[in-house]
Amino acid sequence: MAALIIRRIVLGLIALTGAMLILFFLARATGDPRYAYIGQEGVGIDPEVWERMGEKLHLDDPVPVQFGYWMADVVRGDFGDSVTLQRPVLQVMKERIGATVKLGISAWILGTMVGVPLGVFSATNRGGFMDYLFRVFALLGQSLPIFWVGIVLIFVFAAKLQWLPAGTRGEGFISFNHLILPTITLAWYPAASYLRITRTAMLDVMDSEYVKLARAKGVGRYTVLWKHALRNAIIPPLTLSVFVLFGLMNGTVIVETVFSWPGLGRLAIQALQATDFPLLAGITIIMGGLFLIGILLLDILYALLDPRIKYR
């Protein structure tokens, strides 16, 4: 187990370093980074200020050395100041990450609670009406564009029926009404994915010999279904759950934009539009690190749930 954790940490650090390398050189490919702070024209800038800014960014050093300095700052948690907001990047992210976490976890819980049971019931009613109904739900969930789903929900429940607010969140950190529509929009696709994965895994397990033997021994249907079949079919949904959770945390950009949700996803779009490299780099690195942590936790859960799984 210890060797597995060390190996995954090393591989994760290599992947994260590669992402940082790509980010850094893409920023340098756009030209002198000083123009991001003072505008592309650079008219009216004091030559001494220009030189001091170059020294601060180590622009007189070779590019690999510049990257080394930048990585050292990132390791210390210093992403610099946002170009547009003129505030430390970490401070700006701390103000937004709570909204993203709230939305991502809500969608993850809803998608799991809907998708996994529907997948189980679909498998146990194979070929029946409910099976076809759930499969249509899965097909729509994985084919309809997420932004379109969000717009339709806003049009129906906010504009026409006026039951729920269309966007942003209410007063205070907890606002259930403002959370409903973006959560449903974000959870639609993972719920459909859970349904399909769980259904397939359950069908494979239910056709296995030990399940048939349990039924032949007279074991109750509920016990066979939830104790024997689902327990042995849980690995694929578990794998998906980790990717869904951290994927939702990283992929709330569209939903946050549609619903004007003040999270990191919307902040990343704003940073991209303003060519705010420090802010965009900070968001990318933090989210990438969280995703790698999720992969590490998934490997550990694999080893704990199924000792037959070996890692080389």
Image: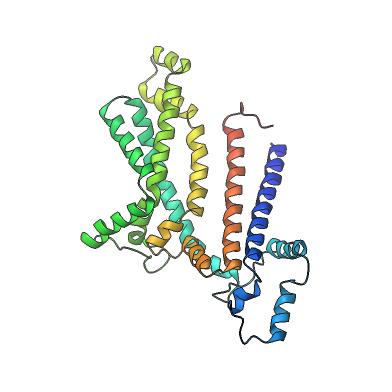
**Closer to the camera in the image, 167 or 179:** 167
Q: Whole-percent x and y of residue 169?
A: 38, 65
Q: Is residue 168 above or below residue 52?
A: above
Q: Is residue 187 left or right of residue 283?
A: left
Placement of the N terminus among the 4 image quadrants: top right
Which corner quadrant of the image does residue 136 belong to? top left
Q: Residue at x 61, y 73 (%)?
A: 81
**Closer to the camera in the image, 12 or 213:** 12
Q: Is residue 257 left or right of residue 8?
A: left
Q: Residue at x 37, y 46 (%)?
A: 188
Q: Is residue 4 left or right of residue 218?
A: right
Q: Whole-percent x and y of residue 86?
A: 58, 77
Which corner quadrant of the image does residue 48 belong to? bottom right
Q: Is residue 164 left or right of residue 110?
A: left
Q: Is residue 241 above or below residue 87?
A: above
Q: Residue at x 37, y 25 (%)?
A: 222
Mark count: 0
Is residue 90 visible in this depiction of the protein? no
Is residue 272 visible in this depiction of the protein? yes
Q: Is residue 111 above or below residue 232?
A: below
